[in-house]
Image: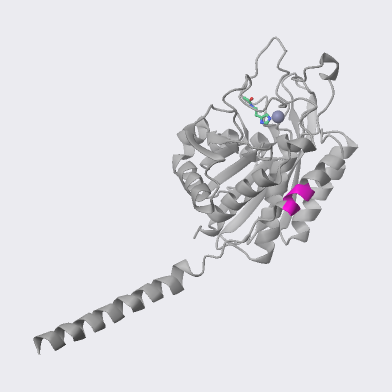
Amino acid sequence: MVKKIFFFLLVFTTGLSCKQTQKTQDTSVAVINVPAFNADSAYHYTASQVAFGPRVPNTTAHLACGNYLAGELQRFGAVVTEQEATTYLYDKTPVRIKNIIGSFQPENKNRILLFAHWDSRPYADNDPNPEHHNKPIDGANDGAGACATLLEIARQAGINQPVVGLDIIFFDAEDWGKASYSAEGNHYGDWCMGSSYWAKNPHIPNYTAKYGILLDMVSAPKATFYKESYSMRNARHIVKKVWEAAGATGYASYFVNENGMGVEDDHVHVNDYRRIPCIDIIHHDPESSSGFGSYWHTLDDNMEQVDKGTLQAVGQTVLYVLYHEK
Ligand code: AHN
Ligand code: ZN
């Protein structure tokens, strides 16, 4: 008799716990369906931007590429806002800029912000050949690859929406910091004019998001992403979340579990002026003198610095984070 009761209890309780497991799976685990990032698409979006020529504000290539980026966001189902403004260089030269914003589920109050800069640097000041110092760069890695990764994420969001609302912003005029050979160093705000403008004048009054993720230089072969110091200071929990996601998706070799340097980049301006905790996923090479790739701000930042494996690692990791957000 005792044995029978024990047997009954065992079956009953086991049955119950099975049911609970089932229930948990039905309500949370099973419904998280992270789309597969397509690196071929991202590569194509990179090449399309580069094909316009250097995307320097006040040029026809810049204008055409801006129309292309806005058109692609629209094609993927985003509500698109183009924010135009005049900003000023360190020497007070006015620059007409355009920030391009694509929003999914604009009515959703629970939002995630993903961003990158779409302009390319007007001068190859680090080029080993001084004759190239005044030439604009392709910025395949420094600009185009990151925007392309976000376009592919937008395409996926249009097919199968994440639970949260999503804003993708392509910021203009990030890359106008003073030339590396200039006598005077850079001051806060010499870089990042587009993001700084938007953070002070968001496209929607009082716009906010749970957090933001900046992608910058995310396409080079064998790129390595270290924990950038402003990201750690302002949004350590997001760094943790992203690095864990990289582990879960199998891309831990790209996301190094070590602290990197601090970079004045768009994420700092969005954090400082809009108070949205932001991180920067940015290639860091601890062996190079600049801390970035040897091709950084040279004419060699071309399509050779675009690798589908790196695009895949970053794109899939960010999709994993986005689709796990509730
Ligand atoms: C600094 O070198 C301090 N900021 C550079 C940010 C940057 C330039 N990202 C891409 N190009
Ligand atoms: Zn740059």
- The residue nearer to you, when weighing 218 against 154, is 218
In this view of the protein, can residue 270 be seen by the observer?
no
Question: As displayed, is residue 238 above or below residue 34?
Answer: above
Which residue is rendered at x = 47% and y = 33% of the image? 258
State the image coordinates of residue 166 (x, y, percent, origin top left).
61, 55
Q: Is residue 259 left or right of residue 115?
A: left
Q: Residue furthest bottom?
A: 1
Q: Is residue 59 left or right of residue 1?
A: right
State the image coordinates of residue 230 (x, y, percent, origin top left).
51, 32
Question: As displayed, is residue 323 above or below residue 97?
Answer: below
Which residue is rendered at x = 45% and y = 74% of the image? 26
- The residue nearer to you, when weighing 266 against 315, is 315
Chief secondary structure of the magenta span?
A: helix
Of the four image quadrants, the one with ligand 2 is: top right
State the image coordinates of residue 244 (x, y, percent, origin top left).
47, 48
Q: Which residues are magenta?
A: 40-45
Q: How many numbered marks are there?
A: 0
Q: Residue furthest left?
A: 2
In the rendered view of the protein, which quadrant contains the N terminus?
A: bottom left
State the image coordinates of residue 116 (x, y, percent, origin top left).
67, 41
Which residue is rendered at x = 64% and y = 34% of the image? 196
- The residue nearer to you, when weighing 36 against 150, is 36
